Amino acid sequence: MSDDIISVDEFEKTRVARFNQLEGSTLPMLDAVIPGCEREIYQIIGRGVGEDATQKAAITDNRDFNVAVVRCAPGKGTLHVAGRKSLRIAAGSLCEWPGKSSGFRG
């Protein structure tokens, strides 16, 4: 159990993803090339679903789960339905960290 204890600095380096530093991919899934399905995916925690083998996750210590953010224009997105959970992030959303805050646009 003591192996899981890390410093605050190490935590911020390895377990915090800053949206403005993420690199998205426009090749998230095969159906993304179909008109009306265009979207961009950001791998946040773990290397989840995606066709772009060069894309890296911001947080690699995923411990059996993955988190990705998909950006697309209203009315666009995916054709397939899978066992995934979705959360809509609106433009101007704000994430806060104790003593700091950083806004990002969805």
Image (cartoon, grey):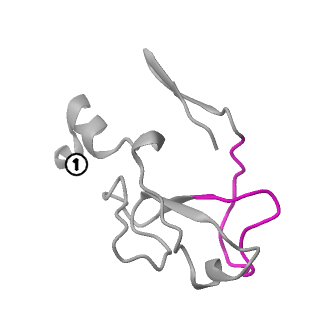
Where's residue 22, x and y in %?
A: 42, 50
Q: Is residue 105 left or right of residue 1?
A: right
Main SS type for the magenta part?
loop
At x 39%, y 63%, the residue is 46
At x 44%, y 18%, the residue is 100
Dot 1 amino acid type: Met
- In the image as oriented, which residue stretches furthest toward the right? 75
Q: From what the image shows, is residue 42 above or below residue 52?
A: above
Where's residue 99, x and y in %?
A: 43, 14
Q: From what the image shows, is residue 70 above or below residue 92?
A: below
Quadrant of the image containing the C terminus: top right
Residue 89 in magenta?
yes
Q: Nearer the viewer, residue 106 or 36?
A: 36
Q: Is residue 37 left or right of residue 99?
A: right
Task: Return the residue at label 1.
Answer: 1
- In the image as oriented, which residue stretches furthest toward the left? 3
Q: Residues within 10 Å of mark 1 (few under 14, many from 20)?
A: few
Q: Is residue 49 left or right of residue 81?
A: left
Check disc 1 and report its element: helix, strand or loop.
Answer: loop
Residue 30 in magenta?
no
Where's residue 33, x and y in %?
A: 63, 81
At x 46%, y 70%, the residue is 48
- In the image as oriented, which residue stretches furthest toward the top? 99
Q: Nearer the viewer, residue 16 or 22?
A: 22
Q: Nearer the viewer, residue 85 or 91?
A: 91
Q: Quadrant of residue 44?
A: bottom left
Q: Quadrant of residue 35?
A: bottom right
Report the number of numbered marks. Answer: 1
Magenta stretch in the rendered image: 70-90
At x 37%, y 67%, the residue is 55
Q: Quadrant of residue 32?
A: bottom right
